[in-house]
Amino acid sequence: MQPILEVRDLQVSYYTDAGRAMALAGVSFSLNPGEKLGLVGESGSGKSTMALAMMRMIKPPGRIEGGQVIVDGINLRDLSEQEMLQARLSKIAYIPQGAMNSLNPVTRIGAQMADAIRAHDRAASKQEIEERCRQALESVDLKPSVLKMYAHELSGGMKQRVCIAISILLKPKVIICDEPTSALDVVTQRQVMETIDRVKNQIGAAVILIGHDMGLMAQFVDKVAVMYAGRLMEVSTVRDMFTDPKHPYAQALINSLPRLDNKGVFQGIPGLAPSLLRLPPGCAFHPRCMHAMEVCRTTVPSLVTLPGERTVACHLFSTKV
Amino acid sequence: MAPLLELRHVTKVYSRGLLSKISTTALANISLTLDDEKPTILTVAGESGSGKTTLAMLVLGFIKPTSGQILYKGQDISQLRGADRMTFRREVQAVFQDPFAVFNPFYTVDHLLTVPIRRFKLAQSKKEVRSMMYETLKAVGLHPDDVLGKFPHQLSGGQRQRINVARALVLRPKLLVADEPVSMVDASLRASILETLRGLQRDYGVSIIYITHDLTTAYHIAKSIVVLYRGTVMEAGDVDTIIKNPQHPYTRLLIDSIPWPDINRRWGETAIKVKESELNDQGTGCKFFARCPFAFSPCQNPPPIFRLADHHAVACYRYEDHPSVPSEQLSSVLPT
């Protein structure tokens, strides 16, 4: 199958007073139509930066330094500003963290949805716009009456579903959701995730779910990408990741999870995530790694492909393949 | 001897304005007892709007109950004056949700820790203040030299949250109210903060009220649990029993919705369907009535609490054939 999304060697830096911070140091992966990828990592590991870079929404002092983002055969980085405006929402949609709190409080939901359509299709008639909004709301299980409502009249889960409805208005190929349920309780969270799954199947888009809730990942995604200090450490299918993680960081992450069968065992990851301004030489994880070797202190490991379509960036595996 | 903390039929109603008839019952007739002798960790769980934060505010004495009493070591906390009030303020401490919002950005960590020590006159000399700070920081798993002298913005979220725990611990509290202490912290740090809290209970004999919506962490840290929904108790008892074998339709829904980090335990496999209630249910019966898939006519009256086992009680008419427990004796089903 032809991948719908290909990210190649994407690099982003932030230029701060204290120096240059490499927030994304060459990230590559690809995604097939309909696939769901989970992107996990600690705060500051570059998850959200990656989403912004894919949308070309990095603001100064940040800068995309290199790499390609290919959606449906088009390299987004080659597009003009005007073309990129058109591509957002129609090729690639982004639901930022806390999007549900960014709905305009003084405009009706319908007007905000119509705005999105009109920005891409000036010729659309009023009836057509309303019909499309109605359909989008229907696919997220909301009644058409929501069109006439204001954001404050909706519950958190409903607001988040409105955001999903807006993101699918133009049937994008890729939907990026940044922590879509972090402020919702478990019952609503499940409803929202099921909604995302359903609309994804309707329009056949690929989904990238950003978050640090490994439980949610286990239940929702097909593939998991573990990020650390701006690099992908491991990309595996969800089953491989949870039953047999390869990278020591992925192992520590999986072992730190609370489960039903290991009550009372708390196993954190020792040490702290490094500052992007002062990354250790070699593998960024080596100061916290149980298996650190001499080579880890000097050389950055490259991504190695292991059997079962999984990739790992660790010297433990670079020689054995 | 009087118990450490006792809630007697506590109700809290928030009313809107003088003329408005709309009022919200955040907490309805809650009775709980925490024993002084046996320090324990009690989880209060529920979704947003269940009244769990109201409970924390009441216990800390920040707000007064609309009716009912809260007793600390036998004394009503709203009546405490002078030295007794100081003792209460020292012995009952809190850790809040957001480790980024609670610090004054202009003060260093030292200031944060020395102020309570001085205020409660816990140390005689500067040297003693310093050794107390070192000791408590070590107790929460921090290296004192890493954090002392630093400003909050120089610390990570996990470090800040542990300093919050240290600030509470330095006062040698008897009771710690932890309101969602790990919900804003990365998964990898979550484990170590929970371990810190459990260490407090085990090694320092601090009782903890752990307030959360996250039943996974509740299961791992607590001994007993009270599940709230819209201000009333739905289910209470031993945490193992309730997480593994929930009986109340609401608790079952909650537990079934937890995304377990285990791909062999699928989400919603045993799905019980809930109705989404669109109207604001102001009925007098069971609070879960409007959403409950099993609702039948008795549910229009508030259900009493039925005792299923020694350490398991459910407020649901489906268990009518079991003996009922008066609400003031709820604590008898909580193991310590």
Image: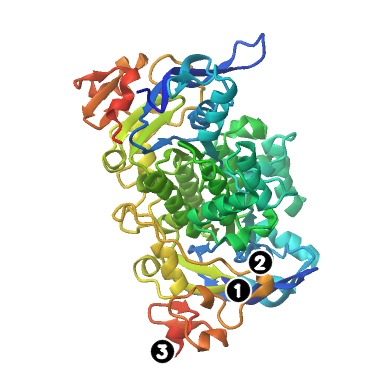
Sequence-earlier tag: 1 or 3: 1
Left or right: B188, with A177 as reference point: left
**Quick check: marks 3 and 2 in contact, CB under 8 Å?**
no
| Amino acid type, callout 3 | Val
Position above or below: B164 against B308: below
Of residues B86 and B317, the one nearer the viewer is B86
Q: Secondary structure at mark 1?
A: strand
Please, which chain is the residue tagged with disc 3 on? A
Q: Position of residue A251 (x, y in %)?
A: 41, 69
| Amino acid type, callout 1 | Val
Sequence-earlier tag: 1 or 2: 1
Please, which chain is the residue tagged with disc 1 on? A
Left or right: B198, with B179 as reference point: left
Q: Mark 3 or mark 2: which is in front?
A: 3
Q: Position of residue B309 (x, y in %)?
A: 20, 30
**Quick check: marks 1 and 2 in contact, CB under 8 Å?**
yes
Name the quarter where the C terminus of chain A is drawn: bottom left
Name which residue lies at 67% across and 10% down: B18
Sequence-earlier tag: 3 or 2: 2
Q: Mark 1 or mark 3: which is in front?
A: 3
* Residue with the mark numbered 2: A54
Q: Position of residue B235 (x, y in %)?
A: 33, 30
